[in-house]
Amino acid sequence: MANDLIGLAGLFFIVIAWIPGVLETIKTKEPGMKKRFMALYFLGSIMLAFYSWQLNSLTFFALNIIALFVPIVHLYYYILKYGFAGLLRPTPSPN
């Protein structure tokens, strides 16, 4: 039981740490991640969610399912700014 509480507390702190970055992206409507990082983050979260599901680890499964939303938010604003065609072009350099 104590281990579950520690795991849930860790889940809570990680999710709380993501909130400011995601809210900033929504507020500014500027993607805060590079395309490659978004893709790696998304794929890693899917793989870890699948792995944690196989291990029956509800805490880590929940964490990785929630983690999927972080790159999705950034991808959404990237597509709004650069369009779908922008996904195929090199990442624009900041000016």
Image (cartoon, helix red, strand yellow):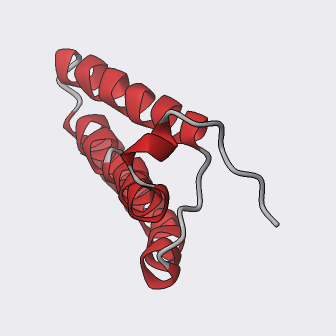
Residue 31 % position (x, y): 53, 62
Q: Is residue 68 left or right of residue 19?
A: left
x%, y% of residue 47?
34, 21
Q: Nearer the viewer, residue 77 or 8?
A: 77
Picture quadrant of residue 51: top left
Q: Which residue appears at 19% of the width and 37% of the height?
A: 58
The image shows a total of numbered marks equal to: 0
Q: Nearer the viewer, residue 88 or 26?
A: 88
Side of 90 relative to 43 (left or right): right
Q: Is residue 9 left or right of residue 1?
A: right
Q: Residue at x 23, y 29 (%)?
A: 57
* Residue 38, horizontal then vertical, whole percent: 50, 41
Q: Quadrant of the N terminus?
A: top left
Location of residue 47 with respect to 77 vertically, above or below: above
Which residue is at the front of the view, 42 or 78?
A: 78
Report the side of 49 relative to 77 (left or right): left
Q: Residue at x 41, y 53 (%)?
A: 83
Q: Check the picture and name the quadrant holding the C terminus.
A: bottom right
What residue appears at the point 50 percent right and 33 percent down from the top-left corner? Answer: 88
- Looking at the image, the residue that sits furthest to the front is 85
Residue extending farthest to the bottom is 27
Occupied quadrant, residue 52: top left
The answer to which of 49 and 90 lies nearer the viewer is 90
Going by the picture, which residue comes out furthest to the right? 95
